[in-house]
């Protein structure tokens, strides 16, 4: 059964028209004409036909290059909103941690940066998760060759922020609970000096936790596009994602492409962070690795590195997710027929 629509940008007044009512014809997926003109139609970053692996990665790069102001600019803005307070909290927590650890001797100073790293990880994770949903709106419009600015994107997605945040909290809580259940028994046995059994249970729990995390993350991967582009709530978005990822071949394809994109993004992020890592190591060497002042500067440098690298890698990862969603709907519901029709009826303006 075909549900939901695919809002794409419209031509009037440079605003994004709501095409959430656009669906393939009632009674089942639309028939896809076998026309060379149709399969070659490409008004935006990808051809309007079912996408291959190379199409998705190439389209993700093109999405960032096609509209860098919205993709990179919005990413930098949102990351700054989260990471500037995070840096301040990190510096404050470092000062408090230094006072607390001073009573335990020099060896305890190795844990000086732990609170700052935890705060930065949570802030970056929240910002990235919200961005991944918001930027999908830009990707959806780029498919039809349109370039919404930051203001247009904000107006189109601000009503979706609460469902996206609820999705992040729900999936995060699920991960914490399942990790505690799977790893807890092994940890408890180790704490009680039952080393052999504890290690075995901990390793088994770790393997199960990784497998479960990969399965769940793949099954819910298309929930953000469904929430943003189709206007669903959290539960409906999760159901939609499970429906679009149904089937073993589909599951492994989405998992493989997502992992490949994640590895590429991680490599690029690591390369972008090399200069900041060198600066951090140099500061730690001069000020003392476990000194309060040195750790504060390292905290600032680490946040700056996360901001600049995330502004590049987050849009790419979001674009991959958005294109996976478009590909699944084209394969399952002949969305390409609908998009070709709309692209021909309302062609993107020349920019």
Image: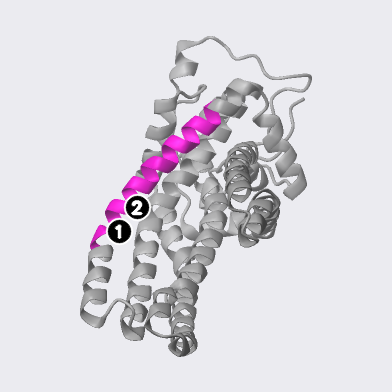
Q: Where is mark 1, residue-wise?
A: 273
Q: Residue furthest top?
A: 34
Determine contact: label 1, label 2, CB under 8 Å: yes
Q: Is residue 315 left or right of residue 203?
A: left
Within-10-Å neighbours for mark 2: few <14, some 14–19, many 20+: many
Q: Where is mark 2, residue-wise?
A: 269
Image position, residue 256 (x, y; %): 49, 30
The image quarter containing residue 249 is top right
Tell me, yes or no, if residue 321 can be seen here.
yes
Image position, residue 41 (x, y; %): 45, 23
Image position, residue 99 (x, y; %): 46, 90
Element under disc 2: helix
**Residue depicted at x 34% and y 79%:** 290
* Above or below 133: residue 24: above
The image quarter containing residue 63 is top left
**Residue depicted at x 40% and y 41%:** 263
The front one of 157 and 245 is: 245
- Which colouring convention does the figure follow? one colour
| Quarter placement of the C terminus | top left
**Residue depicted at x 67% and y 46%:** 227
> Which residues are the magenta region?
253-275
* Above or below 270: residue 342: above
**Secondary structure, magenta segment, majority class:** helix
Gap in Å between the C-alphas at discs 1 and 2? 6 Å
Image position, residue 333 (x, y; %): 66, 23
The front one of 267 and 338 is: 267
* Above or below 303: residue 193: above
Element under disc 1: helix
């Amino acid at each position: 059964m075909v549900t939901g629509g695919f809002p794409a940008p419209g031509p009037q007044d440079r605003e994004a028209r709501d095409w959430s009512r656009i669906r393939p014809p009632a009674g089942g997926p639309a028939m896809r004409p076998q026309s060379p003109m149709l399969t070659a139609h490409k008004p935006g970053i990808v051809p309007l036909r079912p996408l291959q692996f190379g199409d998705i990665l190439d389209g993700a790069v093109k999405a960032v290059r096609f509209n860098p102001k919205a993709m990179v600019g919005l990413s930098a803005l949102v990351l700054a909103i989260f990471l500037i307070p995070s840096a301040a909290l990190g510096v404050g927590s470092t000062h408090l941690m230094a006072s607390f650890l001073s009573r335990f001797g020099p060896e305890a100073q190795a844990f000086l940066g732990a609170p700052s790293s935890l705060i930065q990880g949570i802030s970056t994770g929240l910002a990235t998760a919200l961005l991944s949903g918001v930027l999908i709106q830009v990707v959806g419009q780029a498919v039809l060759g349109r370039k919404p600015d930051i203001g247009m994107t904000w107006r189109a997605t601000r009503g979706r922020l609460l469902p996206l945040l609820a999705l992040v909290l729900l999936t995060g809580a699920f991960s914490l609970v399942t990790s505690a259940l799977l790893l807890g028994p092994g940890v408890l046995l180790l704490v009680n000096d039952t080393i052999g059994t504890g290690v075995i249970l901990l390793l088994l729990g770790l393997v199960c936790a990784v497998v479960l995390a990969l399965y769940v993350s793949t099954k819910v991967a298309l929930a953000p596009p469904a929430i943003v582009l189709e206007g669903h709530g959290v539960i409906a978005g999760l159901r939609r994602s499970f429906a679009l990822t149904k089937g073993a071949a589909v599951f492994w394809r989405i998992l493989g492409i997502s992992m490949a994109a994640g590895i590429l993004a991680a490599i690029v992020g690591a390369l972008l962070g090399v200069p900041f890592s060198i600066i951090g190591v140099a500061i730690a060497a001069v000020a003392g690795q476990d000194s309060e002042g040195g750790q504060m500067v390292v905290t600032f440098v680490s946040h700056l590195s996360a901001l600049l690298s995330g502004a590049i890698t987050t849009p790419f990862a979001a674009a991959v997710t958005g294109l996976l969603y478009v590909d699944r709907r084209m394969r399952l519901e002949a969305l390409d027929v609908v998009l070709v029709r709309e692209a021909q009826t309302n062609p993107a303006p020349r920019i």
